[in-house]
Image (cartoon, rainbow, N blue to C red):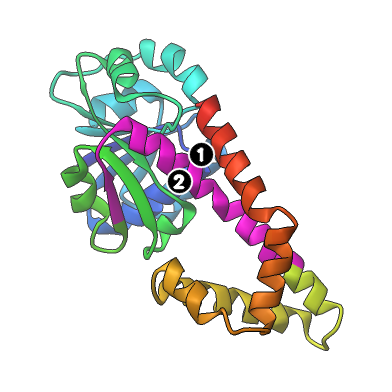
Amino acid sequence: MNIGFIGTGTIASAVVEGIAGDGHVIAVSKRSAAHSARLAGAFPNVTAQDNQTVVDQSDVIFVGLMAEAAGDILGALTFRADQRIVSLMAGASLAEVADMVAPATATTIMIPFPGIALGGSPFMGYGDTDLLEGLFGARNTLFALQSEAELTAYNCAQAVLSPAVRMANDAADWLGARVSDPAQGEAFLRALVGSSLMGGDCASLLAALDTPGGYNQRLRNHMTDSGMSATLAEGLNRLEREE
């Protein structure tokens, strides 16, 4: 495919890296100069262009702009009716994107994560998910959503990643102060949490970790009694209200 990227920030750059080896002709926006120059230097099939040239050369265009700035930037460009637009912007509905890129068709919202650069990453999609499956599904796992309300809920829930990483980091710091090799201690905790979560559903894992009087049960009960679950629910509800 001839694929373009308007806006080449951290996430859009990861998306480019994830498909750059698949034979596509890819044009990336110079708007994020450091990212676009690095991508163009790393892959012979990737070039850095001004925004209108990206549009002119592409059949599928990924839009990775800040939602509040997208209207002005996209409104200055001329799109074609035969082009398909994939939005990477969590803060704009598909209808809003369609208005910005007419007469092109806004077909899809995609919410990727940095791991898509290497593969093995989950990502969310709403709209024409067949397009996303064809581009990314061989190496990543697509979670196809049925409505923009579901997309909002998933966007809120995925924010648990940062608190979870912070918790693992704090535990690693605690462990590192007590062992001879702090880096090994952190690696152990990352491997433990990651592999355990991939082994099955959360309810089964919690049951397996519920040995009466065991370390896991005692720490979980302490944190639950301290308000961890209620605080998490409050934070998710606030994110949903702010959308």
Q: Nearer the viewer, residue 194 or 117?
A: 194
Q: Residue at the spot x=40%, y=69% of the render?
A: 201
Residue 36 at x, y = what percent? 47, 41
Is residue 79 at least partly visible in the picture? Answer: yes
Residue 84 % position (x, y): 20, 30
Q: CA distance from mark 1 to mark 2?
A: 6 Å
Work out which quarter of the rendered image holds the N terminus and state it: top left
Residue that numbered label 2 is attached to: 13
Q: Quadrant of residue 43?
A: bottom left
The residue segment tinted magenta is 142-170
- For the residue carrying disc 2, how many other residues have a C-alpha within 10 Å: few (<14), some (14-19), or many (20+)? many
**Does the magenta portion include 148?**
yes
Q: Amino acid at mark 2?
A: Ser
SS type, badge 2 = helix
When asked about the image quadrant of residue 122, the answer is bottom left
Q: Give me the disc on residue 62.
A: none
Look at 61% across and 48% down and name the residue there.
232
**Horizontal relation, residue 225 to residue 118: left or right:** right
Majority secondary structure in the magenta region: helix
Q: Residue furthest bottom?
A: 180
Q: Amino acid at mark 1?
A: Gly
Kindly identify which residue carries mark 1: 9
- Residue 233 point in image, percent of width and height: 58, 45
The structure residue drawn at horizontal position 45% and vertical position 67%, both measured from the top left corner, is: 202
> Which residue extends farthest left?
82
